[in-house]
Amino acid sequence: MKIQVIQGPNLNMLGIREQNIYGPMKLEDIHKQMKAFADQSGVEIDFFQSNLEGELVDKIQESLGVTDGIIINAAAYTHTSIAIADAIKAVSLPTIEVHISNIHARENFRKKSLLAPVCAGQISGFGPFSYHLAMVAMIQILNEIKSIKDQQNQSAS
Ligand code: DQA
């Protein structure tokens, strides 16, 4: 079981940017915690961050056939990117949208997510713990998919 984590623009500035909103934790520390939980859970995990919309689209496309599910914080592109939404739809991998802050409690322009309709679900507002919750949800989804496939294989044989 493999999970691809995709981080959008300015998330490389965590620990420096707007600490009153995003807290003091750096992205690499969030990833260390996620890796520790993945190891505990027997799951492979890979991390990618870019400030460029096209690179995020490329990474989503490259995930096809390589990974089982995507956890994405597209940051500001959440609210603007039809291209990222289309890429998620195109690969049709289970995808979970994550936000550190509660986007529904902030400016109006952040309340709209173009990605939410193409994701399995959205986790928003729990600080860095949002990523942990997303991993728990993704492992659950992937286990459900696996047990459905196992049942289908059993009844076919
Ligand atoms: C964010 C929320 C977005 O609105 C913002 O542009 C970000 C981070 C979050 O994790 O809370 O860069 O995705």
Image: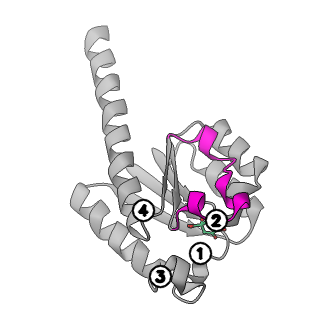
Q: Mark 2 touching mark 1, by CB under 8 A?
A: yes
Badge 3 element: loop
The answer to whether 145 appears left or right of 50 in the picture is left
Q: Residue at x 59, y 75 (%)?
A: 11
- Identify which residue, 157 or 124, lies in the foreground: 124
Is the C-beta of the residue carrying label 4 under 8 Å from the nearest atom of ligand 1? Answer: yes
**Residue that label 2 marks:** 75
Q: Amino acid at mark 3?
A: Gly
Q: Position of residue 111 (x, y in %)?
A: 65, 55
Does residue 46 sit above or below 144 in this rendering? below
Q: Residue at x 43, y 53 (%)?
A: 3
In the displayed orientation, state which residue is furthest to the left: 40
In the displayed orientation, state which residue is furthest to the top: 156
**Residue that label 3 marks:** 23
Q: Position of residue 110 (x, y in %)?
A: 68, 60
Residue 50: mark in rendering: none
Q: Residues within 10 Å of mark 1 (few under 14, many from 20)?
A: many
Q: Amino acid at mark 2?
A: Ala
Q: Where's ligand 1: which quadrant? A: bottom right
**Residue that label 1 marks:** 11
* Range covered by the magenta-colored residues: 101-120
Rendered image quadrant of residue 151: top left
Which mark sits nearer the N-terminus, 2 or 3?
Answer: 3
**Residue that label 4 marks:** 130
Q: Residue at x 29, y 24 (%)?
A: 150
